Amino acid sequence: MALAVTITKAGKFGAEYRIGFKLTPSGTYITGGDTVNFTTATVDPLFVGVHPQVIALGAPLQFDAWTNGGNITTEYAPVLGTTQANCKLKVLTGLGTEATGGAAYPASVLADTIVGEASFVAL
């Protein structure tokens, strides 16, 4: 199951195109990280910017994700993919302990507001 990606802001900064986003988990967690697919991102109703999509070539140069809901029991570990469609987000429920694969997301994750930023090579 992939994480739903919602673009909250976007803009070009020099040779980079940066987006801010929210991630919404559902279903079951996948061992090794759930997919973050920027090509299927939707637009947040409060979007800030001109183009609410990834206007860039290739995979992200970097991306990060964190709690914006004060979740102190869970950590998020982004993993860069080789395309805009196959990045991953690992969920850690303890220091170095990945969430159980094949099980429902922990309640702390479902109740959290997960946000992040990614940068790409701008067109």
Image (tube, rainbow, N blue to C red):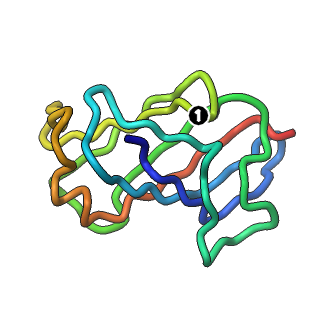
Say which of 26 and 123 sits in front.
26
Say which of 12 and 32 sits in front: 32
Image spot of residue 14 (x, y percent): 83, 45
Determine whether, in the image, residue 109 is placed left or right of residue 95: right
Furthest residue to the bottom? 46
Task: Indicate whether 97 appears above or below 45.
Answer: above
Residue 72 placed where, x, y %? 19, 58
Residue 62: % across, % down: 57, 35
The amino acid pointed to by label 1 is Ala
Nearest the viewer among 68 and 52 is 52
Secondary structure at numbered mark 1: loop
* Vertical position of residue 97 compared to residue 113: above or below: above
Q: Name the outermost residue toward the right.
A: 123
Instruction: Name the residue at 79% across, 61% down.
Output: 51
Say if 51 sits above or below 91 in the image: below
Q: Quadrant of residue 93?
A: top left
**Residue 56 position within the rendered picture, expressed as x and y whole percent measured from the top left:** 78, 39
* Residue drawn at (31%, 68%) of the image: 69
Give the residue drawn at x 59%, y 57%. 20
Residue named by callout 1: 85
**Horizontal side of residue 75 vs 22, given as left or right:** left
